[in-house]
Amino acid sequence: MIENQKEKILQTAELITEETKKSLEGIKTIAIGEAWKILQLTVAGIVQIIENIANDWEGQEKKAVAIEYINNFYDKVFSVIDVPFLPSFIEPMFHKYIKKILMIMTSSSIDATVTIFRTTGVFLKKGI
């Protein structure tokens, strides 16, 4: 059952990926700050999708699926992140580190988003 729910989550979330890719068509580079903003919106979207489909899962299971999706989202959407203070020939070496940093921040952002959604009533606590 969990695998079926996971597949449904990832299929539903793929709409976020496709819409984001479509909105960024024609853009050759994107700044780290803009990528972070897009990742924040993506976190909010995937957290809501997971909560709607698999609200009976434990928090760690939900977070693992969210991180898996966002990691794949990053690879599909952000082919080139522009680091304005680095020369172009050095940037490719730093891209994997940029992704690692953004993914660490995203992990914390997932926790914060869930807390905010619960506190504001977007999600109800288990048992309510």
Image (cartoon, rainbow, N blue to C red):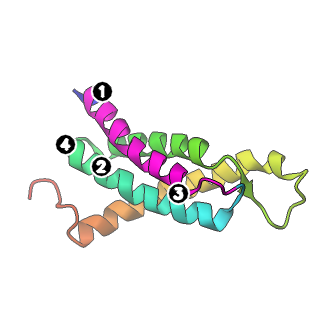
Q: Amino acid at mark 2?
A: Ile
Q: Are marks 1 and 4 in contact (CB under 8 Å)?
A: no
- In the rendered view, tell whether residue 70 sits above or below residue 44: above
Q: What x and y, as percent, mark residue 120?
A: 24, 73
Side of 46 relative to 122 (left or right): right
Q: Are marks 2 and 4 in contact (CB under 8 Å)?
A: no
Residue in the foreground of this view, choosing between 103 and 25: 25
Q: Which residue is mark 4?
A: 56
Q: Are marks 2 and 1 in contact (CB under 8 Å)?
A: no
The quarter of the rendered structure image containing the C terminus is bottom left
Q: Which residue is mark 1?
A: 3
Q: CA distance from mark 1 to mark 4?
A: 13 Å
**Badge 1 or badge 3: first in the primary sequence:** 1
Side of 70 relative to 89 (left or right): left
Residue bounds of the magenta highlight: 3-27
Residue in the foreground of this view, choosing between 86 and 112: 86
Within the image, what quadrant is residue 105 found in? bottom right
Q: Main secondary structure of the magenta part?
A: helix
**Badge 2 or badge 4: first in the primary sequence:** 2
Give SS at disc 2. helix
Give SS at disc 4. loop
Q: Residue at x 22, y 49 (%)?
A: 52
Q: Which residue is mark 2?
A: 49
Q: What x and y, as percent, mark residue 114?
A: 33, 60
Q: What x and y, as percent, mark residue 97?
A: 72, 49
Q: Which residue is mark 3?
A: 23
Q: Amino acid at mark 4?
A: Asp
Give SS at disc 3. helix
For marks 3 and 2, give the one nearer the viewer. Answer: 3
**Badge 1 or badge 4: first in the primary sequence:** 1
Q: CA distance from mark 1 to mark 3?
A: 30 Å
Q: Residue furthest front?
A: 26
